[in-house]
Every structure is written in structure tokens, then in C-alpha cells.
């Protein structure tokens, strides 16, 4: 019966997953082309990886809402492999690299069958961050020159970084009009990537930033071709080169170097980075899943390995789980693996139907997308976050970063692991603590009454974290858990960060995890993830001088006889229950203006994870009701809602009020109760007042306008709206 219901749900969710897959494909198309070009591979190889990955992993994978395709992390590795194995012949080097990709896929399949999905936990968090930052700098260094129209820039990462100032000067002074106009397109594309997230308009954001770049670039070409008397100023050498007959132009791997050291080194590097990037992304996307499911990591690794083998034989890049496209999938209500399949299907359609248009995209436009991606991986904000966790973490981060840039990814991550271990020994002043206890069982778990108790002794770091993880994974996430570190001499940053993830997961699924035994330990900093320290919890800002806006809110609270708390120590517990926050992570609530029933507050939350993460601040109103009401969502009717209709969402019609039905989008599961709740007076109220997005749970309403902080005037209007709405409902 359960399988029948699951299948029925799967079929009913097809329209929304079809829509989510289409939106994801709009990002995957330019990214697939761009990542392939950045890797020194033919542009079509990135699309092949996305198509094969989408189909194979959708059918055989163990995750639910992830999207697969070529990854950012492999750009530097693939480029190095093609350059090294080809010895100057990039075309032949690509064929050798395809062989390395195939063998890498076979290794990933074996790792999956050996249940080695936990290998990612053996890498210290700060070392991984340093490696990712190095990859970001590598992408940035190479693609910055391409973005300015210089596709011939050569050199190591450090040399390319040093050449950037001269590259900018050469671009400004160049007599090559083709290079100049191509660079203008590249710079314009970079501005689109930078400012896209700042424009909180849902119609504009229906098309992802990379696809805006594609549309505008192709549009410029057609403007010169149709309307302008001048010739298109960008030379063909600076446009994407796709084969005329894509299907008959597959490249096939060359295994003749399979026993050489450089080839083996390339296989190890590709497998290492593909595995780490996929494991990190799967873990991050699981946090975003609104249905709170956990991926079968080993099954997913096997599927990714098989997809990589097939992709390599067809001339495609590695297939990995990608965080940015997965985040877009979740935010567009993708609910199962069919979205990954549909995204691949749309890519096939795009390539077959629009190949002539794709050949009109300038290379600098795609390079701008990667320049922005590289910056996000290595942004100063990431370095600041690592420093806030602890100075020792910054040392690990920087050493890993500089070693990776100056040598290779494998050397960099190995050095990062060694440096992390050395720092742990120095902090504890005792190498024997780790040497004597590394192989000993250090985790005891038992159930006491209705609570699971997990005791950890000796030490808990990246070296033995899998022992603790295996115990925690056995506990249902809707249960009560106590993790006791009182017998532990040392707990590192990686473990503290993972404990925070577990705490959040248990909270989301109705359980509760409490960390004890760290009260007497020293901490690297006041950050929740600092080694040897505290229960992860919300960081409350220190009370300080109020801003002008806060002073105004304080005045409003006195005039309205409401309470005001600029830096509340308690959360508004009911907010995470609303559907709006199923795919968004609440970071902080501040400036609470409240009476007995209404609370207006500023809320900071995030969409997506890792490089796809966007932090948003908005002002919202919560009304607590004393009566039970049906759950519903009310919004202004528009183009976006018509798309929802197509995706399988139903708009509830109020027959007696056709104008209301035409102007508002009303949805919910209990249609009869919702119609009974929407009385004539309530409908008249909504028709006569400002439009707000309104969500209802059994005993509360969440109301907000735009996804931004409200002005003082808007807050007054929102308060008045809430007071009058509460009176009508009550």
C-alpha cells in the first residue's frame, strides 16, 4: 500500500518536477558549456556530462533532489590532466583525459559497493575549504583573461594572477576591436552575475542569471545581423565552437597511457575531487530537502561512477553532484529524482534545436559566469568565516590554499591533513593522545527510558569521526538524543560543525539533540564551530547603540503600546512551521515589535547552500490566533501563478466572488474548509487593502510584502493591517 501511495505521489508530482527541471536546465546549459571550455575540453563535453548524469543518476541514484553534471571543482584538475597528458597537444590530451575519467568512474563504483561514502569525513573541514578556495582562485585566474577577450593567456595560476593588472591595461588600450567588444560583453555579463541576486523580483528571477547572459548575448548578435548596418564586431574565434553534427562527433578515450605515472596521478586527482565535491554537495542538499529525507550516499556514489564511465566513453566530463543547480531545483519545488531527468531531457532539446544560436555566444560571456563562481569559492567573506572559527583554522586554510596553488590538489589536501594533525598535537601538547587511541572504540551508545545516550571518550576529530557518525546514523531523527563529550580530551572543528548539522536535522524532523560535557573545555574562539567548545546555537548580537530605524521602531512601540526588543534572546518558535521556510534556513530574528497577538520582526534567512547560498533580510508579520483555521496560501494573481497552474498547483475559486478569484491566487489542501473560512467580510477586507503574501497554519498567519527590510512607514502599515485582520478573523 505504501509503495502504491509513493508511486501515486511520484506521478502527481511530475508537473512540478518538469517545471523545476526546465528552470535548472536554463542554468545547466551555459554552465556546462563554460565549465568544459574552462577545463580545456570541447564545449559539448560539459553538456554530455549533464545529460548522462541526469538520466543515469535519476534512474539509479540514492538522493532525492540533487542535480548532477560537470562540477566547478574539477575544472583545474581536468585542465591540468589535458595539458600534462597531451604534452602540448590539447586534442590528444583530452582523449587521454577521457580514459582517466572512465577509470575514475570505475573506482567510484567500487567505492560505492565498498560503502566508502563516509570517506569525505576523513578530510578536515578547514583543509577542504582551503582546497575549494584554491580551485576558485585557479578558475578566476584563467577565466578573468578570457572574460576580457584574451583567450591566449598562458601560465601557472600565480603567473595568471600577476598578469591581471597588465591584462586590464591591455584591454583598455587594445586596437583589436573584436577583443574589445568581446571584453565589453564579458564585463557586462559579470555585472549581471553580481547584481542578479540584488533584484528581488520573482518575474526577473524566473530566468536564472546565466541564461540571461545567454539570451542577451545571442540577442546582441541578432541585433547586428537584422537591424544594424554594421557587421557583428566579435570575431568567430571568440564564439563557442560546436560541431555541425553533434551526434556523429563524439570523442572516444585513448587508454594507451594507462600505466604511466602522470596518467595514474590524473586518475587519483579526478577521483578525489569528484568524490569530495559530490559528498559535500549531497550533504548540503539534504539540508534543503523540504521532505527531510536523507540520501543513500553509497548508492549515489555508485550511480555517479556509472554515469562518469558512460560520459567518458561518449566524450563527456566527470559527473558529480552540483550544489548550485540542486539549490535551484529545491527552490523551484523539485521533489524527486525526475527533476534531474527532466533537466537532462531539456538539455538534449536545447542542443538539438538551438545549436546555431549557441554558436553565437561569446566565450567571454561564459568566462564571466566562471569568474563569478571562482570568486564565490575564494571570497574574502569565506576567509573571514574561517578566521572567526579560530586562528588555527585560518592557518590550516591558508597553508592548504597556497600549497594547492603552487603544487597540485592532491599535494594540497595531503599537506592540509598533516598540518591539521600537527596543530591538534600542538594544542593538546600530547601526540600520544591520538596515536594510542586512534584505533580504539571511543563511542558508546545506549537507550535510557526514551532517550538515546551517546558517550564519546579520548578524542573526537576528523581522524575518528566516522565512529561517532555511524552511531548517530542508527538513531531515528524524531527521537531525543544526548551526546556527551565529558570523557573527551579534545573535540575538533570538523566534529563541532557536524554536530551542528545533526542538531539542526533532528530539530527539523521533530527530534532533539543536546550536546553536553564541553562546559569546562577551552575554546579556540566564541564561534559555535570552534574546536573543543560549545553547543551550536544562534549567535545573539551584542546590545549596542541603536540605529535611527531602531529608534523609530522604539518610538512606534511606545505610541502603539507594543513591546519592542532589538536583540531578542528567544526565537519566534512558530515561524519555521510555515511552508515558506521549508527550503530556507532561518539565521536570525531581530527588532521584534509585538502585542499579545501580533509580532512584526526583521528576519535573516538563507536560500541554497555553499557557493549557491544567498542571505536575505526581510520584515514579516506573525499573527497568533485563538481559533483553528485551515492551512492556505494567499497571493496576488499574476504570470507567476499561471505557471504554477501549469505545474500542477490548483487555484481555489470562490464562486460568489469572481473578482476576488481573478485577483488572488488561493491554494490549500482543505478546499471546503478554506471556502467556509473566507467569509464575505474577510474577502472584502483583502480586496480593499494592500496586497501581501499570506500563509496560514492551524493557529497562525505569516504575512509579508517584498523580500526586503521594510521602512518605518511600511511597518506602520503592516501593523495596522495585522490589527484589523486579527479583529475580522477573531
Image (spheres, helix red, strand yellow):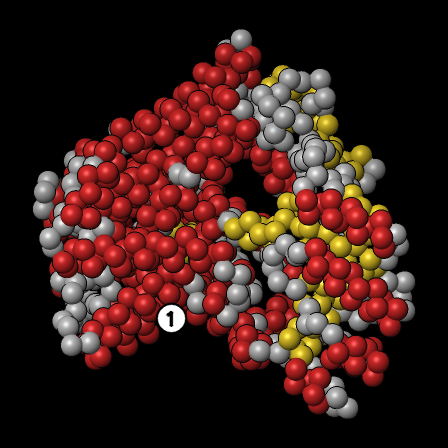
Nearest the camera: 472 or 620?
A: 620
Residue 333 located left or right of residue 554: left
Percent of width and height locating residue 245 = 17, 71
Give me the residue at 47% from left, 37% from top.
381
Q: Quadrant of residue 347?
A: bottom left
Residue 500 placement: quadrant: top right
The residue that appears at 33% across and 74% down in the rendered structure is 349
| x and y percentages locating residue 437 in the rendered image | 55, 17
Q: Which of 226 and 330 is in front in this view?
A: 226
Instruction: In the rendered view, tell whether residue 374 sits above or below residue 621.
Output: above
Helix, strand or loop at label 1? It is helix
Asked where in the image residue 228 lies, by quadrant, the reply is bottom left
Can see residue 352?
A: no
The percent coordinates of residue 710 (x first, y second) are: 66, 57
In the displayed structure, 421 sits above or below 219; it is above
Q: Exactly how many numbered labels are in the figure?
A: 1
Which residue: 62% across, 35% down? 499
Which residue has dot 1 on it? 345
Please state if 269 lies on the left or on the right of 182 as rendered: right
Q: Quadrant of the C terminus?
A: bottom right
Categorize mark 1 by other alpha carbons within 10 Å: few (<14), some (14-19), many (20+): many
The residue shown at (53%, 61%) is 200
Indicate the quadrant containing the N terminus: top left, top right, bottom left or bottom right: bottom right
Coordinates of residue 388 in the picture (x, y in percent): 54, 29
| Residue 346 in sight from this viewpoint | yes
Amino acid at each position: 500500500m505504501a509503495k502504491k501511495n509513493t508511486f501515486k505521489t511520484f506521478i502527481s508530482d511530475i508537473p512540478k518536477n518538469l517545471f523545476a527541471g526546465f528552470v535548472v536546465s536554463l542554468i545547466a546549459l551555459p554552465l556546462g558549456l563554460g565549465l568544459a571550455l574552462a577545463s580545456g575540453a570541447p564545449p559539448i563535453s560539459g553538456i554530455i556530462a549533464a545529460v548522462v548524469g541526469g538520466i543515469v543518476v535519476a534512474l539509479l541514484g540514492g538522493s532525492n533532489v540533487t542535480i548532477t553534471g560537470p562540477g566547478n571543482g574539477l575544472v583545474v584538475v581536468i585542465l591540468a590532466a589535458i595539458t600534462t597528458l597531451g604534452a602540448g597537444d590539447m586534442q590528444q590530451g583530452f582523449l587521454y583525459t577521457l580514459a582517466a575519467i572512465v577509470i575514475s568512474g570505475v573506482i567510484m563504483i567500487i567505492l560505492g559497493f565498498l560503502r566508502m561514502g563516509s570517506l569525505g569525513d576523513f578530510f578536515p573541514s578547514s583543509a577542504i575549504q582551503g582546497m575549494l578556495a584554491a580551485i576558485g582562485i585557479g578558475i578566476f585566474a584563467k577565466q578573468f583573461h578570457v572574460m576580457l577577450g584574451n583567450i591566449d593567456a598562458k601560465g601557472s595560476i600565480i603567473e595568471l594572477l600577476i598578469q591581471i593588472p597588465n591584462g586590464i591595461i591591455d584591454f583598455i588600450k587594445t586596437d583589436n576591436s573584436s577583443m574589445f567588444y568581446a571584453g565589453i560583453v564579458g564585463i557586462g555579463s559579470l555585472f549581471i552575475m553580481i547584481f542578479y541576486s540584488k533584484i528581488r523580483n520573482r518575474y526577473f528571477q524566473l530566468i536564472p542569471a546565466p541564461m540571461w547572459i545567454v539570451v542577451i548575448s545571442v540577442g546582441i548578435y541578432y541585433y547586428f545581423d537584422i537591424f544594424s548596418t554594421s557587421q557583428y564586431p566579435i570575431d568567430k574565434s571568440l564564439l563557442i565552437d560546436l560541431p555541425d553534427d553533434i551526434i556523429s562527433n563524439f570523442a572516444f578515450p585513448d587508454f594507451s597511457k594507462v600505466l604511466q605515472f602522470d596518467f595514474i596521478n590524473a586518475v587519483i586527482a579526478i577521483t578525489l575531487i569528484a568524490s569530495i565535491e559530490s559528498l559535500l554537495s549531497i550533504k548540503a542538499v539534504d539540508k534543503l530537502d523540504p521532505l527531510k529525507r536523507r540520501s543513500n550516499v553509497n548508492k549515489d556514489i555508485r550511480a555517479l561512477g556509472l554515469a562518469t564511465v558512460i560520459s567518458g566513453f561518449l566524450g563527456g566530463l566527470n559527473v558529480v553532484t552540483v550544489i548550485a543547480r540542486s539549490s535551484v531545483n529545491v527552490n523551484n519545488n523539485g521533489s524527486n529524482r525526475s527533476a534531474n531527468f527532466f533537466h537532462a531531457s531539456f538539455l538534449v532539446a536545447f542542443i538539438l534545436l538551438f545549436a546555431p544560436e549557441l554558436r553565437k555566444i561569446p566565450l567571454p560571456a561564459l568566462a564571466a559566469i566562471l569568474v563569478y563562481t571562482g570568486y564565490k569559492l575564494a571570497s574574502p567573506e569565506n576567509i573571514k568565516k574561517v578566521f572567526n572559527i579560530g586562528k588555527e583554522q585560518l592557518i590550516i586554510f591558508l597553508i592548504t590554499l597556497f600549497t594547492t596553488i603552487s603544487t597540485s590538489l592532491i599535494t594540497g589536501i595531503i599537506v592540509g591533513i598533516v598540518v591539521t594533525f600537527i596543530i591538534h598535537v600542538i594544542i593538546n601538547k600530547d601526540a600520544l593522545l591520538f596515536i594510542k587511541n586512534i584505533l580504539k572504540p571511543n563511542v558508546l551508545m545506549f537507550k535510557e527510558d526514551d532517550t538515546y545516550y551517546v558517550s564519546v571518550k579520548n578524542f573526537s576529530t576528523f581522524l575518528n569521526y566516522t565512529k561517532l557518525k555511524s552511531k548517530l546514523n542508527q538513531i531515528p531523527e524524531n527521537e531525543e538524543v544526548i551526546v556527551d563529550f565529558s570523557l573527551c580530551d579534545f573535540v575538533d572543528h570538523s566534529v563541532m560543525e557536524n554536530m551542528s548539522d545533526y542538531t539542526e536535522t533532528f530539530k527539523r524532523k521533530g527530534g532533539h539533540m543536546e550536546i553536553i560535557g564541553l562546559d569546562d573545555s577551552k575554546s579556540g574562539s566564541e564561534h559555535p564551530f570552534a574546536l573543543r567548545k560549545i553547543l551550536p546555537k544562534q549567535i545573539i548580537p551584542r546590545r549596542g547603540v541603536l540605529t535611527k530605524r531602531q529608534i523609530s521602531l522604539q518610538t512606534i512601540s511606545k505610541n502603539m503600546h507594543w513591546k519592542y526588543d532589538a536583540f531578542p534572546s528567544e526565537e519566534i518558535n512558530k515561524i519555521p512551521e510555515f511552508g515558506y521556510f521549508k527550503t530556507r534556513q532561518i539565521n536570525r530574528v531581530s527588532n521584534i515589535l509585538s502585542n499579545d497577538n501580533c509580532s512584526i520582526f526583521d528576519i535573516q534567512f538563507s536560500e541554497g547552500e555553499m557557493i549557491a547560498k544567498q542571505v536575505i533580510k526581510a520584515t514579516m508579520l506573525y499573527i497568533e490566533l485563538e481559533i483553528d483555521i485551515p492551512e492556505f496560501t494567499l497571493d496576488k494573481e499574476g504570470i507567476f501563478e499561471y505557471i504554477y497552474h501549469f505545474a500542477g498547483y490548483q487555484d481555489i475559486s470562490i464562486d460568489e466572488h469572481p473578482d476576488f478569484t481573478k485577483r488572488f491566487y488561493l491554494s490549500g489542501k482543505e478546499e471546503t474548509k478554506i471556502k467556509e473560512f473566507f467569509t464575505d467580510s474577510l474577502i472584502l477586507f483583502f480586496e480593499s487593502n494592500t496586497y501581501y503574501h499570506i500563509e496560514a497554519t492551524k493557529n497562525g498567519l505569516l504575512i509579508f510584502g517584498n523580500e526586503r527590510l521594510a521602512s518605518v512607514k511600511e511597518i506602520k502599515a503592516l501593523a495596522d493591517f495585522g490589527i484589523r485582520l486579527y479583529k475580522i478573523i477573531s
